[in-house]
Image: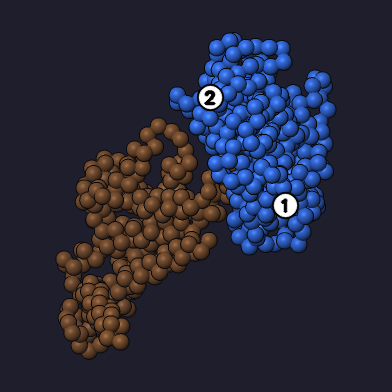
Chain colours: A blue, B brown
Amino acid sequence: MMTPHKNQGGDSAALSIRSLVKRYGSVVATDGVSLDVSAGEFMSLLGPSGSGKTTLLMLLAGFEVADGGEIRMRDRDISRVPPNKRDIGMVFQRYALFPHMSVAQNVAFPLRMRGVAKADREARVRAALETVELTGYLDRMPAQLSGGQQQRVALARAIVFEPGILLMDEPLGALDRKLRKHMQVELKELQGRLGATVIYVTHDQEEALAMSDRVAIINAGRIEQLATPRELYDAPASAFVGDFIGEINLFDAKVEELESGGIKLASGFGPLTGTPVPGATFSRGQKVHVGIRPERIAVRAGAASDGWQAGIRQTIFNGSNVTVYATMQDGQELRATVAPNDREASLARGEAISLSAAPRDVFVFPAGAA
Amino acid sequence: MPDALGTRAFRIAFAACCALILFYLLLPTLLVFPISLGGDPYIRFPPRNLTLDWYGAYFNDPEWRAATFFSLKIALLTAVFSTAIGTAASIAMARGSFPGRRLLGVIVLAPLITPHVVVALALYFQFAPLGLVGTTAGFVAAHCVLAVPYVVLMTSAALAGVDPSLEMAALNCGASRWRALWEVTLPLILPGVAAGALFAFLTSFDETVVSFFISGVDNKTITRKIFEDVDFNLTPVIAAVSVVFVLVTVALMVAVNLTQRGMKRG
């Protein structure tokens, strides 16, 4: 249905955002965001509530007008185009189906607004409903449908007019966990089948990682990092991203020495060697944030001489792994995960352990930026 | 169980009290029903020699008929215009963002709390030099001032129940603002609009004070005519007129109630 558009200009971006700014009084909700979305890409805007991701979505859909910057779709600047003249389909948070119209009328609405002939309209409504695998409900009213079915109708209404871009505003937020997981897989498959360019807004990091080709982490109106899910996890660009994506131990340390193999650091519980995040420069004596994923910390029973000495505070069984809560020498706590069958998983409170982590797994972030 | 019995006795006593209060409130209105059937050519209670002649007198009297039709015409026009104005105003206040939005809300609702006699005097002084006294246009304009607040109240309540994202969805689907309003917002608030229109009709039809001030010799409303006849020509015709009047009002109130029930269901 949606075919990736060939761009004469050479760049294959379906959507380009350049230095977009939106202010509400003294609050800068969108603070100079630049972003390229390729045709056929599934991109998530992920951020905590209040981060500005919804404002960005409103700017893209045209419900808000930017104070500065550009939104280009193909070769056209659409930042001043009214919402009904943009070639963008949208799935709203609570679906926003028209309650006084049947399923067929809801899905036909965008076609009717575009003056598509009646016979053509019916065929396309059927095709769109088939695409979302919801047939036989043409005459039902939205109130007679389950949440998952309403979701499908909303999706059909957003794709029926074959928009260049599909926006989704937390479309699975209202569904229960099991259905949400199921719909994630389905949505992703559907997107691949249609070759649709999707911009997906969510605050659920698991969802973003599971579905996206790339994820833009939004914080305080800016893009904190734009990368593939794997990159975000393995190489977070900031302590915020590290903390927001997955589990991480974050603590303060001081730079002792800069070496080619890594940065030697002093922390409250002992020396360690870490890898600086790209683009940051460090100097001796500087205070830094350090992040280590729990599963990258090796736990050994007993007081080995080459690790950080610690004591077991608690072990928590999670099913596929066991989280070890360790109290370090300076009193702070680190989490590490071990396999359930490891000897370390069954240690008792107070027993001595030693922890270690490879330098490449110790992320060194500049201090200050939370 | 004595407890349950006690509660039950209390409930019956409470219901009886309420019924008595309601009866007391309704009694003056109900009295016109028997009086309108009295055979004597003057108001008398209890009535003697029951007759329906006074209803015949009402329907055959050209002056009463003219006043009735005039009232109905004014009420209908008032309903049409105040519904259009009031609905537009509440949409602007609910969805628009312009300076003075809250002030507009206060101004629109002000006629509700201003004494009618003040409004009436003010309108009279405005209308007299413009030649609007005693004209249909004058009546409709005056009654719209009083009816628009009711329309605004009813339609605002209906609008509050419509998710703004529905209108955004309509725009996103390619509808212009007008079409979004016409195809999505208005159908959803229709029960509120209908209730507002009925209220506007009633407001105009029942209105007495303003009508008293701006009625002319020929164009007078039924309420003004009742007032005049009470002064100069007090016969049971007035009771008959009142009965018809009360019945029309009750019928419209029932209609309002039904549309609101529809609103809750929808």
* Whether marks 2 and 1 lie on the same chain: yes
Q: Earlier in the sequence, mark 2 or mark 1?
A: 1
| Chain letter for the residue marked with disc 2 in the picture | A
Q: Is residue B188 above or below residue B45?
A: above
Tag 2 secondary structure? loop
How far, Cα to Cα, is label 2 from label 1?
45 Å
Residue B106 visible in this rendered orientation of the protein = yes
Indicate the position of residue A128 as horizontal and vertical percent values.
77, 50
Residue A241, quarter of picture: top right
Q: Residue A206 or B263: which is nearer the viewer?
A: A206
Indicate the position of residue B34 as horizontal and vertical percent values.
25, 82
Indicate the position of residue B265 as horizontal and vertical percent values.
51, 64
Q: Amino acid at mark 1?
A: His
- Say which residue appears at 62% left-offset and 33% top-offset: A303
Q: Residue B94 or A246: which is nearer the viewer?
A: A246
Residues tagged 2 and 1 counted as in contact (Cβ below 8 A): no
- Say which residue appears at 16% left-offset and 66% top-offset: B231
Residue A14, quarter of picture: top right
Q: Which quadrant, please, contains the N terminus of chain B?
A: bottom left
Can you tell which mark lies on residue A209?
Answer: none
Q: Is residue A235 left or right of residue A96?
A: right
Can you tell which mark lies on residue A268?
Answer: 2
Q: Amino acid at mark 2?
A: Gly
Task: Tell me the crowding category of disc 1: few under 14, some 14 to 19, or many 20 or more residues within 10 angstroms, Cα based.
Answer: few
Q: Residue A206 or A171: which is nearer the viewer?
A: A206
Q: Is residue B65 left or right of residue A4?
A: left
Can you tell which mark lies on residue A182?
Answer: 1
Indicate the position of residue B129 as horizontal and vertical percent values.
26, 40
Task: Tell me the crowding category of disc 2: few under 14, some 14 to 19, or many 20 or more residues within 10 angstroms, Cα based.
Answer: some
- Say which residue appears at 55% left-offset and 13% top-offset: A286
